[in-house]
Image (tube, rainbow, N blue to C red):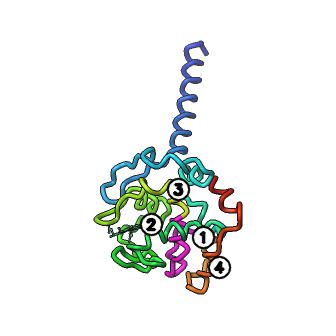
Amino acid sequence: MNRKTILRIALGSLLGAVGTWGAQAALTFNNTVTGEVLDLSHGLPEGRDTPAVKTFLETGNNPYNENASCLPVGAEIFLSACSGCHGHVAEGKIGPGLNDDYWTYPKNTTDKGLFETVFGGAQGQMGPQYGSLSLNDILLVMAWVRHVYTGPPGGAEWLSEDQRRAFKPYSSARVETAQAPAEPGQCRAAVN
Ligand code: HEC
């Protein structure tokens, strides 16, 4: 093998490695209505490199789903940013219900799709939320939206199999516990 061939092979495997890494590191996120690629750098500067955000950007799965210590934080965000339009427990108001298994945009059954809708908005009153909620806040509020789901567990595509087995459709009897303040440090530790 001459030096040129060795060099070519070395270069080839290097480029191959970079290509694979690039594909894994960056999922592409698209606007729910237009399909345009969303530029996540438009998001707020804070809350963009938490462990949960990093995992989500690589896998498309929200690590806060069914994380009991973080649900109260998500509930608070929901009450201030979403419930005015979507109802107290996402039962629907001027915006559609988010707690059943009917979705205008079927991709919202995935965490990636739901994130795209919340970050980039949809039609009419459903404006993009990236200017007011950090990436981490969006994941926290998404976990709460998933938690108040009342439909059949089979429709809860965002849950892992284990989570789906343990999942109990939301009932108001659980509101009290769920809205108790987070144990000091617990969710915060995951957030920061
Ligand atoms: C000013 C009112 C308003 C606010 C605030 C608002 N929404 Fe919406 N939302 C709407 C409307 C209206 C629609 C229907 C838009 C459409 O069909 O394109 C919608 C649609 C959605 C959808 C798509 C539902 C489906 O069936 O596919 C999701 C998900 C959603 N909103 C989540 C949220 C979350 C989470 C928040 C808080 C961070 C929020 N929205 C805040 C009005 C609002």
Q: Between label 1 and label 3, give the one nearer the viewer.
A: 1
Residue lying at 50% horizontally and 71% vertically, measured from the top left: 145
The circle drawn on residue 60 is 3
Q: Which residue is mark 1?
A: 72
What separation in Å lies between label 3 and label 4 (alpha carbons)? 28 Å
> Which one is earlier in the sequence, the residue at label 1 or at label 2?
1
Q: CA distance from mark 4 to mark 2?
A: 21 Å
What's the distance in space between the residues labelled 3 and 2, CA to CA? 23 Å
Q: Could you say where residue 134 lies in the image, as x and y percent from the top left?
A: 50, 54
Q: Is residue 137 left or right of residue 94?
A: right
Would the CB of label 2 be found within 8 Å of ligand 1? yes
Give the residue at mark 2.
81
Sequence-earlier tag: 4 or 2 = 2
Q: Which mark is residue 177?
A: 4
Q: Is residue 96 magenta?
A: no
- Mark 1, other Cα within 10 Å: few <14 / some 14–19 / many ≥20: many
Q: Quadrant of ligand 1?
A: bottom left
What's drawn in magenta, residue-wise?
A: 141-162
Circles 1 and 3: CB atoms closer than 8 Å: no
Residue at 55% x, 78% y: name it.
Answer: 153
Viewer-closest of 170 and 167: 170
Residue at 37 percent across and 75 percent down: it is 96
> Percent position (x, y) of residue 58?
55, 50
Q: What's under tag 3, amino acid-wise? A: Gly
Q: In front here: 132 or 90?
A: 132
